[in-house]
Image (cartoon, grey):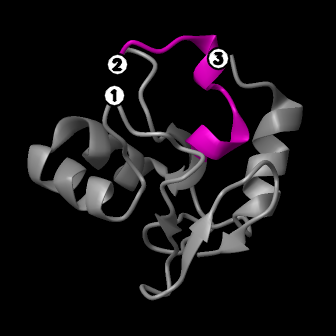
Amino acid sequence: MITQKLRKKIYDRDGWQCVACGTPAGLTIQHRKNRQMGGSKSLDIPENLVTMCGAHNQALEMDAEYAEIGRKNGWKLRQWDDPAVIPVRYPDGISWFLTNRFTRRKK
């Protein structure tokens, strides 16, 4: 379970905006590597979490084509991917960051 304290730190790190579209509305936390993909609560780590709006979070889970876009942008990972080394593309469309702990480091 993602605690409120962890959720706030992830939102702070991501600038309180969706990593896909930049909206500050309807924010949720997305697991880059899904817990049902062989994961557990051990995947509730900052490197595996990104801020997304509800619409993009749902699209990643429900639309195979959009999930592929998510993989290309680091928002969604495969079972064998390591969230600590796969960068995330942020809303400006050109900036890639490693989401190490509670900071973003330019890739």
**Kind of residue indicated by mark 3:** Ser
Please tell me whether mark 1 sits on a helix, a strand or a loop: loop
Crowd band around label 2 with a 10 angstrom C-alpha radius: few (<14), some (14–19), many (20+): few
| Contact (Cβ within 8 Å) of mark 1 with mark 3 | no
Locate residue 101, reporting x and y percent.
78, 48
Task: Give the quarter of the image for residue 80.
Answer: top left
Q: Is residue 12 left or right of residue 84?
A: right
Tell me how far mark 1 sits from mark 3, CA to CA.
14 Å
Looking at the image, the residue that sits furthest to the left is 65
Disc 2 or 1, which lies upstream in sequence?
Answer: 2
Disc 1 or 3, which lies upstream in sequence?
Answer: 3
Magenta-drawn segment: 37-49
Task: Give the quarter of the image for residue 73.
Answer: bottom left
**Kind of residue indicated by mark 2:** Met
Tell me how far mark 3 sits from mark 2, CA to CA.
12 Å
Crowd band around label 3 with a 10 angstrom C-alpha radius: few (<14), some (14–19), many (20+): few
- Where 21 sits versus 32, above or below? below
Tell me how far mark 2 sits from mark 1, CA to CA.
6 Å
Please tell me whether mark 3 sits on a helix, a strand or a loop: helix
| Contact (Cβ within 8 Å) of mark 3 with mark 2 | no
Q: Is residue 80 left or right of residue 89?
A: left
- Where 12 sits versus 47, above or below? below
Q: Is residue 56 left or right of residue 67?
A: right
Q: Which residue position holds label 3?
A: 42
Q: Quadrant of the C terminus?
A: bottom right
Report the residue at 42% width, 85% height from top. 93
Looking at the image, the residue that sits furthest to the right is 5
Q: Nearer the viewer, residue 24 or 66?
A: 66
